[in-house]
Amino acid sequence: MEKTDKKTDILIAAEKLFCEYGFEGTSTRHIAKESGANMAMINYYFGSKMGVFMEIMEERVLGFKSQLNLIKEEKIPARDKLLKVIEKYASRILNNASFHKMMHRELSLSLRPEVFAQIKEAMGQNLFVIEDIIKEGIASGDFRSVDIRMSIVSVMGTISMVTTSPNKIAPDSNYDLNNEEDRETIKKRLIAHLQDMILTHLTKPQ
Amino acid sequence: MEKTDKKTDILIAAEKLFCEYGFEGTSTRHIAKESGANMAMINYYFGSKMGVFMEIMEERVLGFKSQLNLIKEEKIPARDKLLKVIEKYASRILNNASFHKMMHRELSLSLRPEVFAQIKEAMGQNLFVIEDIIKEGIASGDFRSVDIRMSIVSVMGTISMVTTSPNKIAPDSNYDLNNEEDRETIKKRLIAHLQDMILTHLTKPQ
DNA sequence: CAAAATTAATCAATCGATTGATTAATTTGC
DNA sequence: GCAAATTAATCAATCGATTGATTAATTTTG
């Protein structure tokens, strides 16, 4: 044991705290205490608090793209690709709910736009992948000619809102995405709804 | 002239700053300078920085409910009510984009849950109104029996995501919601898409 | 009506606490 | 023994909040 180096200790602690308290709400002292490292180590390894934040974001965002591209290259109908994308996307976001919430929170701040430019850029590429799949379906005559970007935004927006406000889909009970049982329940409902909706929306009436 | 009292000066300045920099990122000194009031006035009138924030939120949220209820009570088919709700909802959010972004940003923080409880409560009531309209349509046989809450979340999530990331729907150009021309363009596209999607999703195949 | 008393509004100054960051000294590992 | 890693101590800056004093507006009183 005892194989954890301080640098990753800081990253792990910082991610947890950023998710819970946001960037501004997390102090370097808090990160230091939570990670067991000295305050100066943060600037020693990452230069600044923002340096820590950026390293966390980059690591996560890079992992997102590959998964979608795998689906895109499969030899199945566009319709099935789309259903798969929805399933993977919803699972990915819901499984990392607090990170997703934090990311949108901080990205929505108009501050430091130059810092987030690359991250937004990388995220935007996910859109292209889905766009291509829908275009493929339209070209093959399987899909109606809809507002592609808007349709994608509807899928993403639905997932995002379920993540930020899972209680919205519960008339009475209070769902908790940190509870695995609740999360699986929500995930199933979300995926079923999205697949139903996107198909009724995209598929031509017989 | 000279009819602006300091209290509303503070509210106006604070709302602008909160929208731009978030709650944590806005200092009372900044609010004081922007409003032309003395720092002490903020605590004199509102008790604390959070007091200012809450007063702004409450004022806005209360205005939301009435509009929806008016539509609900109209003597038109559920289908038309729903189309109207989408139109009004989208317009309302897009016209106050920066406020909407700020609200979601701050509400998503798990901090101060007791403070935001009432606001979330009030927002949740909007859901009931829309839910009733869809139930009405299902009862009358006009609508399919879908996952009502999820369908509502899709509408809200789409509007929300267009508001936070309008560039997602623009393949090339950069839309700006502060530009009135861009905003109207986006609004039309958004409403058209949502109305099309919700109808293809809810309406039974002929 | 006008003087006195009271309340509300505003101010500059400053409080202690906390912020992110840096320094210089020390320890560790090879 | 030397470079990398880690520490405690400290920096200036800023934070939200409060103070006591001052002015403006209102109410009360005779």
Image (tube, coloured by chain):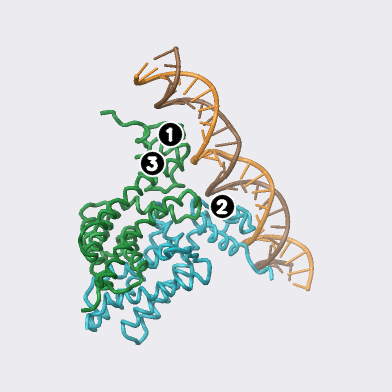
Chain colours: A green, B cyan, C orange, D brown
Could you say whether the residue bearing mark 1 is in a helix, strand or loop? helix
Q: Is residue B40 above or below residue B126?
A: above
Q: Identify residue for label 2.
A: B28
Who's the residue at 27% across and 81% down the image? B137
Around disc 2, counting alpha carbons within 10 Å, would you say few (fewer than 14), some (14 to 19), or many (20 or more)?
some
Query: Disc 1 is attached to a residue of which chain?
Result: A
- Determine the CA span between mark 3 and mark 1: 13 Å
State the residue in front, B112 or B92.
B92
Q: Nearer the viewer, mark 2 or mark 1?
A: 1
- Mark on residue A14? 3
Who's the residue at 45% across and 33% down the image? A39
- Mark on residue A159? none
Using residue B14 as the reference point, say whether residue B81 is left or right of it: left
Q: Identify residue for label 1.
A: A45
Q: In the rendered structure, which amino acid carries the disc numbered 1? A: Tyr
Q: In the rendered structure, which amino acid carries the disc numbered 2? A: Thr
Who's the residue at 37% across and 56% down the image? A125
**Residue C5 occupies quadrant:** bottom right
Could you say whether the residue bearing mark 3 is in a helix, strand or loop? helix
Q: In the rendered structure, which amino acid carries the disc numbered 3? A: Ala
Query: Disc 3 is attached to a residue of which chain?
Result: A
**Residue A156 occupies quadrant:** bottom left
- Determine the CA span between mark 2 and mark 1: 33 Å
Query: Disc 2 is attached to a residue of which chain?
Result: B
State the residue in front, C28 or B26.
C28
Around disc 1, counting alpha carbons within 10 Å, would you say few (fewer than 14), some (14 to 19), or many (20 or more)?
few
Residue A184 coordinates in the image, percent (x, y): 21, 56
Q: Nearer the viewer, mark 3 or mark 1?
A: 1
